[in-house]
Amino acid sequence: MTAADRMAGFLARQSRQRVDFDALAGAADQGDSSLPCSPGRRQVLADAAQELVRRGLVLLPAGHNGWDYSVHPPLPRWVKRPPLTRAARTKPGPRAWVSQLSRLATVQLTPGDHVLLGPVNTLLRDRPDAEVIPLAERSYELYGDEKYLHGIERHRLVTRKILDVTAHLRARPAPAPLAMFELGPARWMLIVENSAAFTSLREVLGSWPDRDQVGWLGYGAGDQLIASLPTAVDSFRERDHPVDRILLYADLDIDGLECARLADARGRAAGLPALQPAVGLYRALLTRPLRAVPAVPPARLREAVSWLPPGMASDVFDLLAQGKVLRQEALPLPVLRACLDPEAPLLPQL
């Protein structure tokens, strides 16, 4: 998904016609942990803004005051969504819902709701016991578009428990699997957020002298971890190698911490152990050079750092409140290797 795609998704959820570009830029950062600190970020954002214009999703400011010229390339301070052309509405007529969808008769439905629900009603009428299949496959079958049902779990009918993905759509999520590597027989897994840190830890743990001390190593790939973590259940079962502890080593920034909290909740709901911070690695990371970023509101920070143990949480809160973060790349392979002592038990060091 490109920066423009993430911006477009953010725009689709907004009710106001005018949207601050800083909010769009924040949406572009989501899912790409390398973008916020990339020297080419501003050009990426400028290109994404032009792509949104080409898609007909936004209008850029016409006057000089609507642009930030402090650094090249200039960026808009805000964008406007073009006014919608209102088509004449025709109110859908009464519909006989199958018994599974009978609650819909008590809800005021929009024309878009009827477009969504019509094929579901037909499915439950003709095949009420249809096999539960991946959501994208059901989406293609019912609507001719594999992405039509993407994000359906956030639809108001689903959140109000009137429409159920499994019972009514006869579908289930099928997230990309967590990339996992079985390095040894120990009953733990360490998940690493960024590819560079993952590569370094794979080299260190792959050559650990006592193989019995080494377990699984996973690659979290930013906020994709939230959706992919539950798939680890199947890998543990297929390899007959369960775990008692799952550790996460991510960037010490607001995105990494919020991702950790959400992934922890999603993993526990799937029956996995709690997702714990790799405190030993974080202690080493906290000794490394800091990076400056825009500060985060304290209320949001307090909730995010609550995933960390209390002493470390207060230290990280202070750093992030000052607009400082620590990326995993600040702990390079030689330093990381020196931090881990092959003569001592491995897991406590992590």
Image: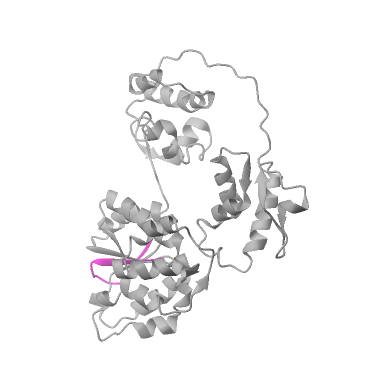
Visible residue check, residue 221:
no
Residue 132: within the magenta? no
Q: Is 171 positioned to the left or the right of 73 in the image?
A: left
- At 39% from the left and 33% from the top, the residue drawn is 158
Work out which quarter of the rendered image holds the C terminus and state it. bottom left
From which residue to which does the magenta span run? Answer: 178-192
Q: Is 280 positioned to the left or the right of 55 in the image?
A: left
Q: Nearer the viewer, residue 118 or 109?
A: 109
- At 72% from the left and 59% from the top, the residue drawn is 74
Q: Is 273 positioned to the left or the right of 177 in the image?
A: left
Outermost residue, right side: 63
Q: Position of residue 92 (x, y in %)?
A: 52, 16
Q: Position of residue 213 (x, y in %)?
A: 24, 76
- At 27% from the left and 58% from the top, the residue drawn is 274
Visible residue check, residue 201:
yes
Q: Nearer the viewer, residue 287 or 188?
A: 287
- At 31% from the left and 81% from the top, the residue drawn is 208
Vertical relation: 334 (above or below) 134: below
Q: Position of residue 15 (x, y in %)?
A: 56, 37
Q: Is 143 positioned to the left or the right of 124 in the image?
A: right
Vertical relation: 20 (above or below) 33: above
Colour convention of the picture: one colour
Q: Main secondary structure of the magenta part?
A: strand
Vertical relation: 218 (above or below) 80: below
The quarter of the displayed image where residue 226 is located: bottom left
Residue 183: within the magenta? yes
The quarter of the displayed image where residue 222 is located: bottom left
> How many discs appear?
0
